[in-house]
Image (cartoon, rainbow, N blue to C red):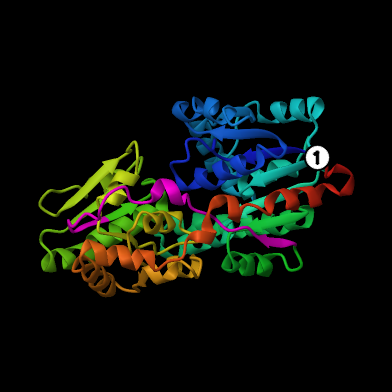
Amino acid sequence: MRVLFLTHRLPYAPNRGDRVRAFHIVRALAPRVQLELVSLAHDDDELAQAEGMRGLGVRVTALRVPAARNYAGAAVRLAGKRPLTHLLLDAPGLRAALTQIVSDRPPDVVLAYCSGMARFALEPPLAGLPLVVDLVDVDSEKWAALSRSAAAPRRWIYRREARYLRQFERRLARHAQATLVVNERERAAFDEIAPGADIRVVPNGVDLEPLAPASPPDERPRVVFCGVMNYAPNVEAVLWFAREVWPAIRRRRPDARFVVVGSEPTAAIRALASADDGIDVTGTVPDVRRHLWDSAAAVAPLLTARGVQNKVLEAIAAGLPAVVTPPVFEGLPASVRPACRVADSAEAFAHETVSYLAMTGAQRRAVAAAADLRGLAWETQLRPLVGILADATGPAAIAI
């Protein structure tokens, strides 16, 4: 079975949330199908990582996104009805590359990662080929949620994006043999948009063995947040925590430190770094695990959260309990929730975080260990995927 996998980022290295799931999909499929990967790359460093994917036995085509040109094009098309996501996620030569692939190595099925790449499956030369879409989470719902907390003019832009993406998602569901999401919350959301669509839950996983703590727990009162720090929900979360929650924590624990770990921090995030306030901003790090193992607790103060927050799964696997907001908690697997405390206000968030800092390292590890992660390995979570793809092609093309 030939599978053409379209991704909006080259899924290597798997060091940010929008690459991790795609990377593990490649690892799950490569030994079992003839896998061809077509990915967008958003900078030269990402483009250079294509060799990492070829090392997994995958044929790779990576195309550079001209960000400035795409943003300019999107700005002049605001009066139209196309989702801006579709205008931003494009690259010169992409359609020519797809035409060559279909001519030389026609795929039995297209697997499109997120709605931004699914639109190429509805256009020539891919139109008419069997299609499975991995939405991960429902993009239109994410933009609608962002619009509720954004100031003008972003509020209007986000509402526009939610409206036109919802229309596209409804059309997409009519063409896809199956649509994948990561949890029941996303299934329910998409079912409202496209009643009767074939929606399958294929959850996210976690790399248990590499994340397992390599040493006894650290007793220092360090609180950690991990995430890409130019992603709007992460930026909003960290700014809220630093401004509304952290001062209350420091009044009760002056020795506490808040470590923000993640690539591409915005100017507002970089400005938080302060020895006096106990906040560190690392920027890109070679290995996030060291920062997890050196911390006492993880926080996920996201006010806007869809799907499953892998940052929480990874923190718990690394031996940390977590404090999370209700939107984050609702997206987590039930087996993970015993390692989390939920806080719906700044005061509650400070209280729950300080209560973790008051524990010994061994006690915090015990809280994290209350989560049952055994069934969340990526290999287990993605096991149904080959069967879903084979079913989409019909009986004649199931041979692998």
Quarter of the image where one finds residue 354: bottom left
Query: Residue 104 in the image: x percent, y percent?
Result: 79, 24
Q: Which residues are magenta?
A: 198-223
Considering every residue shown, the one lying at the far right of the view is: 396
Query: Residue 188 in the image: x percent, y percent?
Result: 63, 70
The residue carrying pointer 1 sits among few (fewer than 14), some (14 to 19) or many (20 or more) residues within 10 Å by Cα, namely many
Q: Which residue is found at the position 48% from the left and 30% from the top? A: 46
Label 1 is placed on what type of residue? Asp
Residue 280 against residue 166 in the figure, above or below:
above
Residue 185 against residue 7 in the figure, above or below:
below
Q: Which residue is found at the position 41% from the left and 52% from the top? A: 232
Query: Residue 255 in the image: x percent, y percent?
Result: 11, 58
360 or 340: nearer the viewer: 360
Q: Which residue is found at the position 60% from the left and 60% from the top? A: 163
In reply to whether residue 211 is colored magenta, the answer given is yes
Query: Which residue position holds label 1?
Result: 108
388 or 101: nearer the viewer: 388
Quarter of the image where one finds residue 381: bottom right
Quarter of the image where one finds residue 258: bottom left
Q: Quadrant of the N terminus?
A: top right
Q: Which residue is found at the position 47% from the left and 49% from the top? A: 207
Left or right of 344, for residue 362: left
Question: Would you say residue 387 is visible in this rendering?
Answer: yes
Left or right of 143, for residue 167: right
